[in-house]
Image: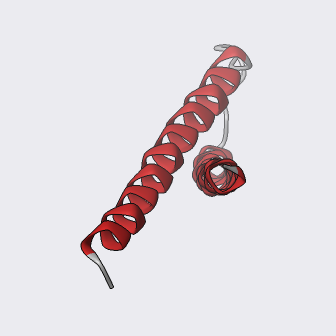
C-alpha cells in the first residue's frame, strides 16, 4: 500500500466523520428547536415523556449523521 493510497483513505474517513458530525448536530438542533416550540408552561410533561423524547432525538440524530456521511461518501465516489 502506497502512502498516497493511505492518505486518500484517511481523507475519505475524515470527510465521512466530519459530515456525520455535521448531520448529527443539525438534526439534533432542529429536533430540540421543534420540541421547544411545542412546550406549554401550563401543561406539565411527565418524566417518561421527557426521557423518551431525549432518546428519540439521539437515535434520530445518529441516523441522520450516518445518512449524511453515506451521502457524502457516495458523492465522492461519483467523481
Report the front residue among 12 and 43: 12
Q: Nearer the viewer, residue 42 or 16?
A: 16
Q: Quadrant of the N terminus?
A: bottom left
In this view, 27 is above or below 73: above
Instruction: Please name the residue shown 67% across and 34% down the image.
Output: 45
Q: Is residue 11 left or right of residue 54?
A: left
Seen in the picture, residue 4 relative to 42 is either above or below; the reply is: below
Is 58 situated left or right of 42 in this image? left
**Residue at image point 32% right, 72% down:** 6
Residue lying furthest left: 3
Where residue 5 sits, quadrant-wise, is bottom left
Image coords of residue 46 (percent x, y): 66, 43
Q: Position of residue 60 (x, y in %)?
A: 68, 51
* Viewer-proximal residue among 67 and 78: 78
Q: Residue 23, percent across and down? A: 57, 41
Residue at 43 percent of width and 46 percent of height = 18
Amino acid at each position: 500500500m502506497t502512502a498516497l493510497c493511505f492518505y486518500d483513505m484517511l481523507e475519505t474517513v475524515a470527510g465521512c466523520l466530519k459530515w456525520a458530525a455535521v448531520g448529527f448536530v443539525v438534526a439534533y438542533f432542529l429536533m430540540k428547536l421543534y420540541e421547544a416550540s411545542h412546550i406549554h408552561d401550563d401543561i406539565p410533561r411527565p418524566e417518561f415523556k421527557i426521557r423518551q423524547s431525549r432518546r428519540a432525538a439521539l437515535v434520530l440524530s445518529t441516523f441522520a449523521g450516518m445518512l449524511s456521511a453515506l451521502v457524502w461518501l457516495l458523492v465522492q465516489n461519483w467523481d
